[in-house]
Image: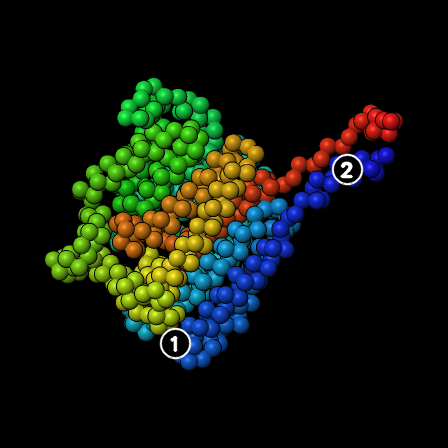
């Protein structure tokens, strides 16, 4: 009877599909597609297959294989799409960065240096951090214990660029710190730590925040005392915008909180209030911050402000970049000029970081832009699906916060580059050159995979009691 009982108690876990073989097959395609793209660039530029193609393919394949083995071992029931899509985006990003490294026009720029070798190292570090998350974080609910500690850590990370001697001013934005010979963008890691704090805080306070005091124009407005948290977060985001002149991080920071607040309370009024406060803050700061003003001018009338701006100023530089970006998208058409055959290097040395999406638009066309946005959309969709499947309220809020932050970053960067909103200086996840971004986003994917494993893991079927078995035996 003991063997039968043991078999019954574990059949629920044994019978559930882990989908790891599906993930492995998708990973093969996620490695092969960038390898073919790499060969395509080499043939377009030099009429020959690049000599480093084999090494690139083996390197990307090794990183993907290590990540897959770690997931197979430590998160066997995780979502099978997150890892292959992130690998594909990372691999294509390496190809795009290498393509821009080959530009003779960029090589003549004094401050330019090849970014692809460093990006491959950063990608390896990102995979290592991904593996570390899988191994160390056995259960995401452990993070709930560190709700208020995470708030302190996030504030420290956000304020580090303001420390004299540590922070670095890059084109008016103080979002970097320099440690030794390396530059780090702490805000990329702060978004993950903030998601921990927001999820833990809102899980406790959501009932109070969901209470309405009065109805106005069809909206149930929250009580005045409950507006405190959103006012504090709004003030902090404005301070970041003022002192670091960084529109992207402040929007990401505040937007993630509003999304999680809406999910926790199911009150549409929080979305309306949040959008209104974001608009008021952005307009107010734009009225006196020169760095933000130049980006707004480049957004509203790039060709006009290029004619009127004084040469050599930030305004002239921002307007010139935006005109080049728009012309890159315009010359790409539906199917693009082909990998390696565009002129997006005219944008300048930031072509491989802030503006790398313009290379996608020119060389892969509208079809390529939509394909990349679809891949990003799939990551966001799988993150939201993970949040819906999570069995604990902290996991639901945590997953939706990370997915919301990822979605906001994609929207802010793609919208800025394509002229929908002003530029923010953030980087496109996985494809833009930048160590902080790729490492932090691999950690984000790792956490989503951990939450999805917990959500999809089948609960063991309880063993029937001996009395129930006896009843089944003697029943006529």
The part of the image, by quadrant, that contains residue 311 is: bottom left
**Which label's residue is closer to the chain start, 2 or 1?**
2
* Percent position of residue 243, x then y: 27, 42
Identify the element where label 2 is drawn: helix
In the rendered view, how is the structure colored? Answer: rainbow
Q: Residue furthest front?
A: 476
Residue 45, disc: 1
Residue 293, disc: none
Residue annotated with mark 2? 8
Q: Please tell me how crowded label 2 is: few (under 14), some (14-19), or many (20+) other residues with Cα within 10 Å.
A: some
Look at discs 2 and 1 and give the one toward the viewer.
2
Front residue of 118 and 130? 130
From this view, report whether residue 192 is shown above or below residue 305. above
Q: CA distance from mark 2 to mark 1?
A: 62 Å
The residue positioned 42% from the left and 35% from the top of the image is: 260
* Marks 2 and 1 in Cβ contact (< 8 Å): no
Where, quadrant-wise, is the N terminus in this rendering?
top right
Tell whether 430 sits left or right of 103. right
The part of the image, by quadrant, that contains residue 118 is: bottom left
Front residue of 335 and 271? 335
* Percent position of residue 32, x then y: 53, 66
């Amino acid at each position: 009877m003991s063997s039968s009982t043991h078999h019954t108690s574990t059949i629920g876990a044994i019978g559930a599909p882990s989908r790891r073989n599906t993930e492995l097959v998708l990973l093969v395609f996620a490695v092969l597609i960038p390898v073919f793209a790499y060969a395509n660039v080499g043939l377009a530029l030099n009429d020959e297959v690049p000599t480093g193609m084999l090494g690139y393919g083996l390197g990307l394949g090794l990183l993907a294989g290590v990540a897959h083995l770690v997931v197979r071992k430590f998160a066997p029931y995780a979502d099978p799409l997150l890892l292959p899509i992130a690998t594909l985006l990372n691999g294509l990003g390496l190809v795009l960065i290498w393509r821009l490294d080959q530009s003779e026009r960029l090589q003549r720029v004094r401050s330019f240096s090849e970014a692809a070798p460093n990006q491959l190292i950063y990608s390896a570090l990102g995979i290592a951090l991904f593996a570390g998350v899988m191994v160390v974080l056995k259960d995401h609910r452990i993070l709930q214990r560190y709700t208020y500690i995470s708030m302190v850590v996030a504030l420290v990370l956000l304020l580090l660029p303001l420390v004299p001697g540590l922070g670095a001013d890059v084109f008016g934005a103080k979002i970097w710190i320099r440690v030794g010979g390396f530059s780090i963008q702490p805000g990329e890691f702060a978004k993950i730590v903030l998601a921990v704090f927001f999820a833990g805080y809102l899980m406790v306070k959501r009932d109070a925040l969901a209470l309405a005091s009065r109805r106005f124009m069809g909206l149930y407005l929250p009580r005045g005392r409950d507006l405190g948290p959103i006012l504090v977060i709004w003030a902090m985001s404005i301070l970041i915008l003022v002192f670091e002149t960084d529109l992207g991080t402040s929007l990401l920071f505040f937007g993630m909180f509003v999304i999680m607040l809406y999910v926790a309370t199911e009150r549409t009024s929080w979305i309306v209030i949040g959008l209104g406060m974001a608009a008021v803050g952005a307009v107010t700061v734009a009225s006196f911050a020169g760095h933000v003003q130049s980006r707004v001018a480049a957004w509203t009338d790039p060709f006009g402000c290029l004619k009127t701006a004084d040469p050599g100023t930030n305004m002239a530089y921002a307007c010139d970049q935006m005109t080049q970006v728009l012309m890159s998208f315009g010359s790409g058409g539906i199917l693009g000029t082909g990998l390696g055959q565009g002129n997006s290097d005219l944008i300048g040395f930031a072509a491989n970081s802030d503006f790398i999406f313009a290379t996608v638009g020119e060389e892969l066309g509208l079809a390529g832009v939509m394909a990349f946005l679809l891949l990003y959309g799939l990551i966001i969709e799988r993150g939201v699906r993970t949040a819906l499947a999570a069995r604990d309220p902290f996991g639901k809020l945590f997953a939706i916060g990370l997915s919301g932050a990822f979605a906001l970053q994609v929207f802010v960067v793609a919208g800025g580059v394509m002229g929908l909103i002003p530029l923010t200086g953030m980087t496109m996840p996985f494809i833009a050159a930048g160590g902080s971004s790729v490492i932090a986003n691999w950690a984000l994917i790792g956490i989503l995979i951990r939450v999805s494993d917990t959500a999809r893991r089948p609960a063991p079927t309880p063993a029937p009691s001996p009395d129930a078995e006896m009843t089944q035996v003697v029943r006529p």
